[in-house]
Image: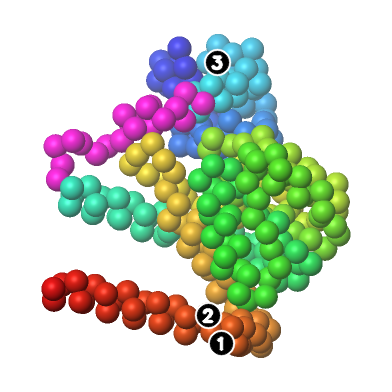
Amino acid sequence: MDIFERIKKEQDGFSKSFKKVADFICSNYEEVAFMSITEVAKRSGVSESVIVRFSAALGYSGFIEMKKNIAEKVKENLKLPNRMTSSSLSENMSANEIMTAVLAKDMENILYTSKEPYNKSFEQIVREIHDAKKVYIIGNRGLYKIAELTELLLTPIGIPCISINAEDSIQFQQLNSMRKNCVLLAFSLPRYSSHTYTAIKIAKKYHCKTIVISDSIFSPDAKAADLSLEITVKSYTYLNSYCAIVSMINAIITAIGVLYKTETLNSLNRLENFLQNFQVIESYSKNNSESEKRISQSKTS
């Protein structure tokens, strides 16, 4: 019997304080799996002793056992087939209906992210990235592609950075070159990677600032970092939605560009001069025109 079944079975006998705890756990169980008893008590609006008694009332030996049961539930829900089957979308829907639902969910993710009360460190994060001697951007699986995108967008405005695949041992070794005044920017979503957590520990050893963008500030990586931003990643399928995380990257890069406009313009002008001097743009335009010409000729013939 999992914790939700136990809560449902015992809820009629709950006191007012127990109901607060139950409501909080049911609404935030993915976060509770990584929270301390102090954090759960504070967020629930009750004392730690109430949490202990609540755990006992559900048949657990204590908070630790209850939290372990919640973590097992979270792990089970993260299995790809389970995530897919839990979707509220139906195979009876049309493709256009699915498209509308998915886009609406992504807009909702961005809206929730913009209103997230824990994202008060955004301004400091922008400053840390701008001032960094070098930014190491790390992610695993799909998040590595997000790290590559971030590197691609930061480089033109003069931010020295490098993207690292957390699961590539050769790339991971580049963290050894970190020095003071460098920044580690990590992307962390379920299923969380132990490699990302290790990277944060390494960065701290070198006295580097650590920044994590995650689905929860209570995730293991976010809790270990100096600064964090919380983004909403809910989706109708087996994957996390990357919409809000890409929007957050856009917000960071835009903020750097606007707040440090002179430096940004200098970097962009240097890049533009480089492209012009080496005829990169002209070469691309010429090749593109020749391709269009060949296509036009083939259609005529």
Label 2, residues with CA under 10 Å away: few <14, some 14-19, many ≥20 = few
The quadrant in which residue 288 appears is: bottom left
Residue 289, compared with residue 35, is above or below; it is: below
Q: Which of the marked residues, 3 or 2, is nearer the chain's N terminus?
A: 3
Residue 214, compared with residue 278, is above or below; it is: above
* Three-letter amino acid code at the position of disc 3: Ala
Image mark for residue 276: 1
Q: Is residue 26 magenta?
A: no
State how far apart marks 1 and 3 are (Cα): 72 Å
Residue at x 24%, y 39% (from the top left corner): 89
Q: Nearer the viewer, residue 170 or 177?
A: 170
Residue of label 3: 57
Instruction: Give the residues drawn in magenta, as a range.
Output: 75-94
Q: Nearer the viewer, residue 3 or 235?
A: 235
On the question of residue 265 being in view, the answer is: no
Quadrant in the picture for the N terminus: top left
Q: Which of the marked residues, 1 or 3, is nearer the chain's N terminus?
A: 3
Q: Give x and y (percent) for residue 245.
A: 50, 56
Q: Secondary structure at mark 2?
A: helix
Image mark for residue 280: 2
Q: Give x and y (percent) for residue 19.
A: 48, 30
Residue 130, compared with residue 116, is above or below; it is: below
Q: Is residue 79 left or right of residue 133?
A: left
